[in-house]
Amino acid sequence: MVVGLRILHVTPFYDSDRSSGGLGIAVGLLADAQVAEGVEVSVFTVASREPVDREGSVRSVHVYQFPTFSPSRIFLSPRLLLALRARMKYCDIVHVLSLWHFPGTAAGYLARRSGVPYVISPHGTLNRWARAYHAYKKVPYWHLLDRRLVLAATLIHFATIMEESEARAWIGDNPAVVVPLPIVLPDSVPRE
């Protein structure tokens, strides 16, 4: 048990009912596992089926959803920025999930400025294919914002050895760890 530890996950996607897949499910499973260990877990996100500014508790995970300012995948949210600024003094660790978006960039910047350690889980966003896709937007974003975010991270979490290997050119000698993502197995396997 890790009673008393306070973790803030910052992600563009969170899926409490596990119906959409990907990053939203990964952070949900991680948050549930941390709560089971006695950790106080909050999630700041902008993506939701109902894009409203609301607070909710999902299985003891405190989820805060914020509206975005623009329709782009950068997820610009002034209300999220204000909430992050207010929350930093109550965090022991900030966990940034994925790259190339405002919520993660803002969380990393504010954590660094506040002296709060932060971990980044790129979830494949530093792999060759992801870097090449829309590179005309990502290369400037990297050099202006995310490069500093990544290089100042306390730790970078990768789900696979291949993910870490492909990202090494971008992260340099930063401390990194490979820990597979949690999965939920069905109670029974469907038969044909």
Image (tube, helix red, strand yellow):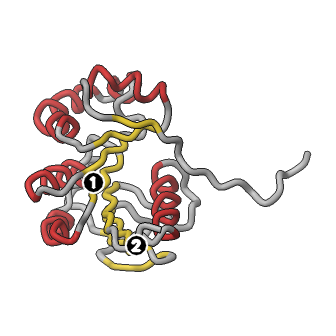
Would you place residue 129 above or below residue 30 in this image? above
Q: Name the one closer to the observer, 3 or 171.
A: 3
Disc on the earlier residue, 2 or 1: 2
Q: Type of residue at label 1?
A: Pro
Q: Residue at x 17, y 53 (%)?
A: 106
* Residue 84 drawn at (x, y percent): 18, 65
Does residue 141 appear to the left or right of 30 in the view shown? Answer: left
Q: Which residue is mark 1?
A: 71
* Residue 172 drawn at (x, y percent): 24, 24
Would you place residue 131 above or below residue 42 in this image? above
Would you place residue 47 above or below residue 60 in this image? above
* Residue 11 drawn at (x, y percent): 34, 55
**Label 2 secondary element:** loop
* Residue 17 drawn at (x, y percent): 56, 67
Quadrant position of residue 167? top left
Q: Which residue is mark 2?
A: 3
Q: Type of residue at label 2?
A: Val
Which of labels 2 and 1 is toward the front?
2
Q: Residues within 10 Å of mark 2 (few under 14, many from 20)?
A: few
